[in-house]
Image (tube, helix red, strand yellow):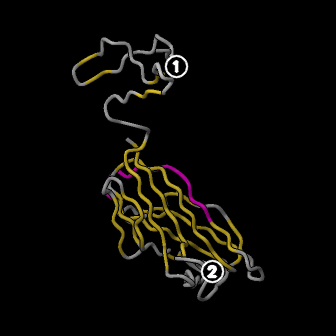
Amino acid sequence: MPEILPDNVPSPRTPLGWDTVRYRPLSIDAAGNLQVVIVGGRVGMYRDYVHVQDQKARNTPGGGFTLGAWRTRDINTELADTGGICAIAANQITLQAGVYQYLISCPAFKVEHHQAVLYNVTAAVIIRTGTSEISGAADAVMSRSVIVGRTTLAIASVLEIRHQSSATRAGDGFGSPANITAEVYTVAEFWREW
């Protein structure tokens, strides 16, 4: 059975002590199939995954966007919570303690300049600022402020996705509907590390 990794890969520590057999995480069997050995029950660098979003009925706009202050984005649908670590209520996301990587996307329509942030309500602090974007009032084009990063939550924390614009747009400033199926506007994904 040929090995993919060199023979001198150190053996991992197990609950019973050091392995005496050479560690072979990847190998190819006689039939040519790739074999993967999982030690300790961990696969990858994430143990939990959360996916929440603002989902509305078909042809429903994302809502009005008023300039001059941070506006909290709607979060009303939980699509995944593999570890039971998330709760959503009143447009807030509660996550259990841990180290998280995240990807958040917030659309805006005809509001000129706009930018979103991930805000920790529990600690009263902005965690990360999103990209600076523009969606011109004269254009029929949406753009998205994207928030990407990594943070440590020392305790269970309430988070909000906040957004600010330089112009007001009633009705659909938070997103214009596609009128194809359910409308999806703000999308947030969180990966909790081991």
Q: Is residue 129 left or right of residue 44?
A: right
Of pointers 2 and 1, the one earlier in the residue sequence: 1
The verdict on residue 146 being magenta is: yes
In percent of width and height, residue 99 lies at 40, 47
102 or 47: nearer the viewer: 47
Q: Which residue is mark 1?
A: 4
Going by the numbered disc 2, the residue's amino acid type is: Ser
Going by the numbered disc 1, the residue's amino acid type is: Ile
> Which SS does the magenta portion mostly show?
strand
Which quarter shows the C terminus? top left
Q: Which residues are magenta?
A: 145-156
Q: Residue at x 46, y 18 (%)?
A: 30
Q: Is residue 72 left or right of residue 110?
A: left
Outermost residue to the left: 16
Outermost residue to the right: 138
| Labelled pair 2, 1 in contact (Cβ < 8 Å) | no
In percent of width and height, residue 156 lies at 31, 57
The local secondary structure at tag 1 comes to loop
Q: Is residue 102 left or right of residue 98?
A: right
125 or 2: nearer the viewer: 2
Q: Residue at x 23, y 25 (%)?
A: 15
Dividing the picture into quadrants, the one containing residue 167 is: bottom right
Dividing the picture into quadrants, the one containing residue 115 is: bottom right
Return the mark for residue 131: none
Q: Is residue 1 above or below residue 133?
A: above
178 or 99: nearer the viewer: 178
The local secondary structure at tag 2 comes to loop
Q: Residue at x 54, y 64 (%)?
A: 117
Q: Residue at x 38, y 76 (%)?
A: 90
